[in-house]
Each structure stands twice: as structure tokens, then as C-alpha cells.
Amino acid sequence: MKIRSNIALKVCLALVLVLLGLSGCTGIRSTPEGGSGGVIADATIFLSPSVKGAGGGFGCTAPILEGKLVAVDAENGNRLWEVTLEATRQSGGYGCAPSAIPVAIYGPPAVAGDRVYIAGYNGRIYEIDASTRLSQDRYVNEANPQPIIGGPVVSGGKVYLGSADGMVYALDGASLEQDWEFKTGGKIWSTPAIDGDTLYIGSFDKKLYALNASDGTEKWAFETGGAIISTPLVNEGTVYVGSFDRTFYAVNASDGTAKWGKPFEGGSWFWANPVIYNGTVYAPCLDGRVYALDAESGKLVADFDLGSPVSSSPVLLGSSVFFASENGKVYSLDATTNQLNLLAELGEAIQAPLCATFEGGCPSCGIIYVYTGSQNLYALSAASGAKLWSQSIK
């Protein structure tokens, strides 16, 4: 089944062109717009607001730009604190004045204890102490800084991330000094996933890699037909991942072989991350549909038309999966009955990943947090979709 979506392709091609646009003094400079989804730790939401880059254009100059890490109280939306992620300058070349690299943030932060890690489009990794707000940062690639699009993950005292230079890096979580690096054959936009002693990450070279988390040696590489930018989903010995070849794959984690006899073909790119519940994988697609696939066979169980590209990664609360489409609608899906319900209409573009909380074993009492393209953070009741609070995050 191939359902073509010209709108979805145009949306993503525009983002691709922005992120890969040339900078410097040889024509019109394209600069990034950032804005990460949030992560929640100890009733605090950590996220980076959207920032708009200022192009150097033909004048070859650009101002210093700033990005921020903001901490928000998950209960009431109050801004607790913020830390500015200072921008840096690079030479414009050919006698031009130095130009700024915006500290745009695309990937979500990672939290380990009091430490919050976030990676910037300027090629730096930042570590902020949530208690003292003291921070440190460094270029991941000192010799040739390249944009970092995905977010970091933290495990066992190490920080793992990929870069547009095609490298996977492992850093010491305390000092940010490099522990090891691994080279792929293309740019990396994917946020890695880690399961036990194995790190999984996709690359623009069309491969999904499984690396030894302790030393970065390759365990296996699985080749797809397109670039991979979503975060792999690891569940019970299987790695699930979508690709820009409009195909969704299941790979045996032990040896990197295909699990399904035939991968599933969607109607456009798989950009957002999948989730799994009770043997069914839910894979959002830029064709505006969410595909429910049998985790063992890859056969289509059901599909749901959200009417707009789905680039926001969903969240799972109990037996309910929550999705957001780019046209500002938030949906809840009862995974036991495959009943889809419209939860809320925010009227603002939604592309950042969703996050959620619930307490006391009551998923229906949970809260869904949505960060929109209008720089607003919403807290919605998971049961009714009622707006509990909203806050401008700029």
C-alpha cells in the first residue's frame, strides 16, 4: 500500500533544506529554527524554546543568537528557571566578518540526576546542573564542529549522541571528555536508543547500527532503503525503526537480521518515533496516518487517518496512545479497542514530541504536555482533553 502525500513531503523537504542549507558568504544564508520537545523529571519539564536564526545574506554578517534551556513546573506551568546557551562565532571566509551559529535545539534534553544534557546545532554539548544552574559545554568535534540535530541519551555515566559529521560519540557524563567515537557513512540526525550494553542509532547512510556501548565497536549494521532519523524502539529482543524509504522495519537485536518476512510500506517518510503496546507497534507517518502493526509479523492491524502529517512523537499512558498532527490536533487511541478519539484542537502547529505524566497508577488521570510552533506549552487532561494550563515558552 502506497499512499502518497505531497503536503507531507513538502513540509519535510522544507525542513531538510533549512537544516542542510549553506552558510557563509556565498549567497543567501539559510539558518535554522529550533525547538525541542520536553522531558519530565521530578515534576519538572525541561525543554528548549524555538529560536529563529538570522541569516547573513549577501552582507555576510549576523548577530550573536541565544538559545535557552527552560525548566517548567509540570503541575502549574510556572517557569522555574532558565539557562542561556551562549552562541559562538565562526569565520565568514573571504574577508567577511564572523557569522553566528544559532544555538537552535532540535533534540530533546536528557536528564540524569541533577544533570541535564542538551545538544546544539552549533556542535556543542551542554551540561547544566539543575540545582545550581552551573554549566559546562564543549564542542563534540573540536577540529570541525558540525550541527547536532538529535538529542543525547545518558546511561552508565556516559552521554551518547550522533552528529552531522557522521560520527557517534560517547562522552564522560561528568567531564564531557570523549570516551570513544564511531564513524558511519552519512550524517546523523537520529537520537540514539540504548538497551543493556548496546546502543542503536540510524544514519543518513541508510543503515541502522548496533554498537557496543562500552567501547563503540560495531555489533552489526542493518541496511534500509533510505535515511533514518527517528529513534529506534527496542522491545523484547527486537528493534523497530522507520526510514525515509517510506518503509518500517523490525530487526532482530541479537544479530541484525530482518525479523519480518517483508517490511511494512507506508505512504511517506517515517519521521516520528514509534511506540508499542501489548504486541502492537504504532508507527506515525508523514502521510498523516498512524499504522498499527503486529509486532511479530509486521502485518497491518489497523490504520488511522489524522488528516495531517505526523512528525510529533507519541506517548503511551497505560493502554492509551496519544498522537498529535501538524495541524494542531491531539488524539487519544485506546490500544485495547483501537478506538481513536479527538482529544483537543489547539489551532497551532505541533511538531515537537509529546511528553506525559501520571501518578498513583491512574493513567486516565495523567497529563499530556504539548509544545507548539507558536512557542506555547499546553497541559491537557489525558481523560478529557481539557486545558489545565498553558504557558508561553520563549
Image (cartoon, helix red, strand yellow):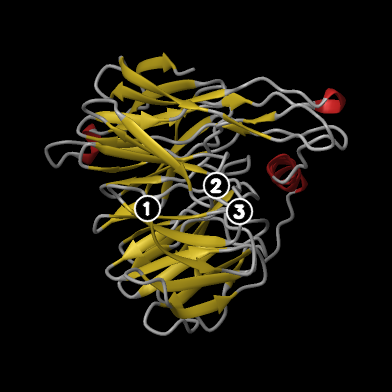
Identify the amino acid type marked 1. Answer: Glu
Query: Residue under circle 1?
Result: 177
Identify the amino acid type marked 2. Answer: Ile
Residue 148, disc: 2
Residue 184, by quadrant, is bottom right
Q: Residue at x 28, y 57 (%)?
A: 155
Find residue 121 and report its horizontal and vertical position in percent: 57, 40
Find residue 134 and report its horizontal and vertical position in percent: 29, 28
Q: CA distance from mark 2 to mark 1?
A: 17 Å
Marked residue nearer the N-terminal end (1 or 3): 3
Query: Residue under circle 3?
Result: 164
Q: CA distance from mark 3 to mark 2?
A: 6 Å
Question: Which label lies toward us, 1 or 3?
Answer: 1
In this rendering, would 140 be left or right of 389? Answer: right
Numbered disc 3: secondary structure: loop
The answer to the question of whether label 3 and label 2 lie on touching residues, with beta carbons closer than 8 A, is yes
Q: Residue at x 22, y 36 (%)?
A: 114
